[in-house]
Image (cartoon, rainbow, N blue to C red):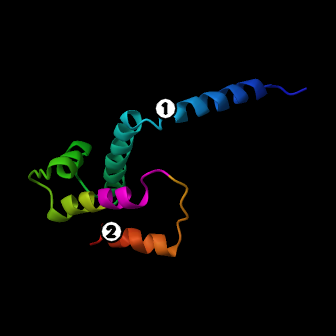
Amino acid sequence: MPLFDNENRILQIETEKKEIFKHMENPLISQPFIEDFAKRFSWNTNAIEGNTLSLEETIAVIDYDEVRSNHTYSEYTDAKNAYYAIQKLLLPFAKTAIDEEWIKKANGYIRH
């Protein structure tokens, strides 16, 4: 006899998941989530590379082309280019093969 019998709970979660994804088809729900994801992903990927922009500064440059002191030009362009690449290659969310061609395309968007 298993220590835990969670089969019913798993079925319940799968049913709830389907309901949630139905709501994500509504652009009023999905669009703000997608925008937030793209901006945060742009900020995170650049922060990993040593970019010193804060999340707030990253959003300001993406949305308003607003720059502040104490940052380099390349930090701002990296944030905007990463956001552009995310918009082109990752959104809308879909299963995508990441192969050599995809990587070259992503690099082209980021380094243009």
Badge 1 element = helix
Bounds of the magenta segment: 82-93
Mark 1 vs 2: CB contact within 8 A: no
Badge 2 element = helix
Q: Does residue 6 appear anywhere in the picture? A: no
Task: Check residue 85 for magenta coloring.
Answer: yes
Residue 48 image position (x, y, % from top left) = 36, 56
Q: Which mark is residue 3?
A: none
Judge left or right: residue 24 versus residue 52.
right
Give the vertical position of 67 relative to 27 (above or below): below
User: Which residue was labeled with disc 1?
Assistant: 23
Residue depicted at 23% across the width and 46% down the height: 59
Residue 106 image position (x, y, % from top left) = 39, 68
Q: Does residue 29 appear anywhere in the picture? A: yes
Give the vertical position of 82 relative to 33 (above or below): below
Give the vertical position of 2 relative to 104 (above or below): above
Looking at the figure, which quarter contains the C terminus? bottom left
Label 1: few (<14), some (14–19) or many (≥20) C-alpha neighbours in 10 Å: few
Judge left or right: residue 39 versus residue 67.
right
Q: Main secondary structure of the magenta part?
A: helix
Mark 1 → mark 2, Cα distance in angstroms: 32 Å
Residue type of the residue flagged with mark 1? His
Residue type of the residue flagged with mark 2? Tyr
Task: Check residue 100 for magenta coloring.
Answer: no
